[in-house]
């Protein structure tokens, strides 16, 4: 960074609160972004556009995929074997970058997803990850004591169930296909969507139970 | 052409490069088995420094027994596993252990 580009003094970034103290990584990121814009590698709007795409996604998008897989076994197979094509069917076209992979929970196997190296997450479908997913505590403890971590989230996984922790360290972004709750036979797809929680898509929780009609 | 198949016993090499890589430290030097082929991807070790990432590298989902990783400190079942995507250049084949039942 040259003397003409110092983050002290009266240099201000639009949109940044003036009393925000920036961490060193944040300062480096801003410097890199400005350099890329100055050198014409990216347009000032490119970053905002990508952030808009991510912000437009939410856990409910993952919930829609799960609900469809619950009611349509053929779709579920396609989702597990070729997630890109299956997601496109539901109107979620592939975004550039990381590929989504789906792991299925069964009576015998429960999956939990973490990224120990950074905070890789199926952002292109679920939107930004929750803060706890990015915390050092979750990232380090999920691989060492997954059952303890899940218990803290309120999920007790039976001893007979095999726990598989998936560390998405490389190019795939994993989403869990949770088990369909009992007592949901015959429920409409949109009602099933409402049962699927974000936590269940990461594996630290289970879908909600359906409300019992009186 | 993938060098390994699901079920193959593999060891994660302790060190391939000191520069950017996507192999978590806690599995370096450890023995696991290939669970699945995850596909071939641009090489992140090259892309991190402005390279093209070509040739693409095979990526494998490799599993390790939790108790083999953490020993008796692990609080969970014997079947509990850790699965992690590892690039082919970080894997070497390992023979089956003596007296193994397959």
Image (cartoon, rainbow, N blue to C red):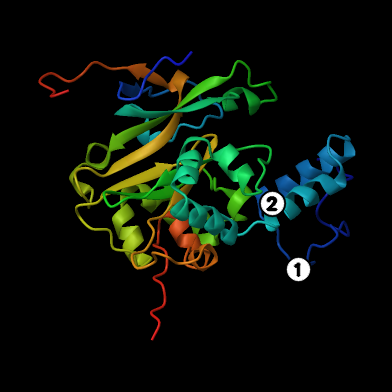
x, y percentage for residue B32? 30, 29
| Residue at x 34% of width, y 40% of height | B82
Rendered location of residue A26, percent (x, y):
69, 51
Left or right position of B44 against A152: right
Q: Chain of mark 1?
A: A
Q: CA distance from mark 2 to mark 1?
A: 14 Å
Which dot marks residue A19? 1
**Quadrant location of residue B100?**
top left
- The answer, for residue A190, to whether it is visible in the render is yes
Mark 1 secondary-structure assignment? loop
| Residue hosting label 2 | A26
At 54% from the left edge and 48% from the top edge, which residue is drawn? A121
When the figure is inspected, residue A129 is found, relative to residue B60, above or below; the finding is: below
Residue B80 spot, x, y in % from top left: 26, 44
Q: Is residue B77 left or right of residue A12?
A: left
Residue at 61%, 59% in the rendered image: A58
- Of residue A180 and residue A128, the one placed in the foreground of this image is A180
- For marks 2 and 1, the one nearer the N-term is 1
The image quadrant of residue B99 is: top left
Quadrant location of the C terminus of chain B in the rendered image: top left
Residue A71 located left or right of residue A40: left
Q: Which subunit holds the residue at mark 2? A: A
């Amino acid at each position: 960074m040259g003397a003409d580009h110092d983050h002290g003094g009266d240099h201000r970034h639009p949109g940044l609160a003036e009393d925000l103290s920036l961490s060193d990584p944040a300062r480096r990121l801003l410097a890199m972004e400005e350099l890329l814009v100055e050198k014409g590698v990216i347009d000032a709007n490119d970053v905002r556009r990508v952030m808009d795409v991510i912000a437009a996604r939410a856990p409910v998008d993952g919930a829609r995929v799960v609900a469809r897989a619950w009611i349509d076994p053929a779709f579920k197979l396609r989702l597990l074997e070729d997630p890109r094509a299956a997601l496109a069917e539901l109107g979620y076209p592939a975004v550039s970058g990381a590929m989504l992979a789906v792991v299925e929970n069964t009576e015998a196997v429960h999956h939990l997803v973490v990224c120990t190296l950074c905070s890789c997450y199926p952002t292109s479908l679920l939107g930004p990850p929750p803060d706890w997913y990015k915390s050092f505590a979750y990232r380090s403890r999920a691989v060492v004591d997954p059952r303890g971590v899940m218990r803290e989230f309120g999920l007790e996984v039976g001893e007979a169930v095999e726990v598989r922790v998936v560390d998405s360290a490389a190019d795939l972004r994993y989403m869990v296909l949770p088990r369909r709750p009992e007592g949901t036979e015959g429920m409409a797809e949109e009602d099933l969507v409402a049962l699927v929680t974000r936590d269940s898509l990461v594996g630290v929780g289970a879908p909600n139970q359906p409300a019992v009609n009186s | 052409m993938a060098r390994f198949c699901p079920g193959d016993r593999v060891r994660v090499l302790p060190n391939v490069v000191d520069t950017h890589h996507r192999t978590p430290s806690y599995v370096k030097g450890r023995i696991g088995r290939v669970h699945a082929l995850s596909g071939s991807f641009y090489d992140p070790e090259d892309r991190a420094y402005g390279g093209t990432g070509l040739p693409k590298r095979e990526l494998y989902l490799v599993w390790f027994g939790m108790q083999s990783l953490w020993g008796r400190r692990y609080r969970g079942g014997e079947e509990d596993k850790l699965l992690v995507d590892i690039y082919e250049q970080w894997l070497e084949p390992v023979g089956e252990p003596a007296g193994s039942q397959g």
